[in-house]
Image: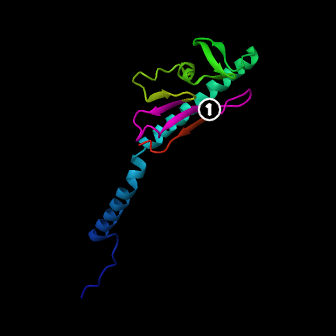
Amino acid sequence: MKSLSKQKGFTLIELVVVIVILGILAATAAPKFIDLTSDAKGAVVEGLEASVNSAADLTYAKALVQGQTGVTGTVNIAGVGDIDLVYGWPANDEIGRLLQVDFSNDGDFVSATTTNIWTASHKNAATATTCQVIYNLTNVNGVGIRPVIDSNITNCD
């Protein structure tokens, strides 16, 4: 009678089971790593918010130097022209000019302006009130009061 030799390696069934388990894990984890568009759009919105903050701060600094911090005023920005001010801060309809972005063109954003609020929404956002940057002058009623500049990156799908 022959003696049984010790098994070395994996059987075919064991290999198939391991491959099936790896396939299930990959199918479960892949959507999290593949769907990065929402994160990318959110990052673009946050980048635009940072640009709006910088443009507003630099304009306000120039307005302070030139004594243009009254209810209305203007400063001349090189390459842009005269910018209308509200207590030294850029008027809401001047943000697009300061950023030197044509929001009516085929870019990523669409802007809207109301009495004291400027918004730029991502064109591919789920709704118009999500995935946007907001520049709000509503509470600016004196020198030294900063406008609210914020972003909303919910539903940037």
Residue 152 lies left or right of residue 63; in this view the side is left
Query: x, y percentage for residue 81?
Result: 59, 11
Instruction: Tell whether position 124 is magenta.
Output: yes
Observer-nearest residue: 11 or 91? 91
Quarter of the rendering occupied by the C terminus:
top left
Residue 4 lies left or right of residue 54; in this view the side is left
Q: Amino acid at mark 1?
A: Thr
157 vs 116: above or below? below
Mark 1, residue position: 138
User: Residue 83: which quarter of the image?
Assistant: top right
Observer-nearest residue: 60 or 84? 84
101 vs 15: above or below? above
The majority secondary structure of the magenta stretch comes to loop
22 vs 41: above or below? below
Residue 89 lies left or right of residue 67; in this view the side is left
| Segment colored magenta | 118-147
Give the residue at x 65% y 31%.
147
Instruction: Tell whether position 132 is magenta.
Output: yes
Exactly how many numbered labels are in the figure?
A: 1
Tell which residue pokes out farthest to the bottom in this image: 1
Query: x, y percentage for residue 67?
Result: 75, 16
Query: How packed is label 1: few (under 14 Cα within 10 Å), some, or many (20 or more)?
Result: few
Residue 45 lies left or right of residue 59; in this view the side is left
Give the residue at x 52% y 28%.
114
Quarter of the rendering occupied by the N terminus:
bottom left
Observer-nearest residue: 41 or 115? 115
Colouring: rainbow
Query: x, y percentage for residue 93?
Result: 54, 22
Q: Helix or strand or loop: what does disc 1 sit on?
A: loop
Tell which residue pokes out farthest to the left in this image: 1
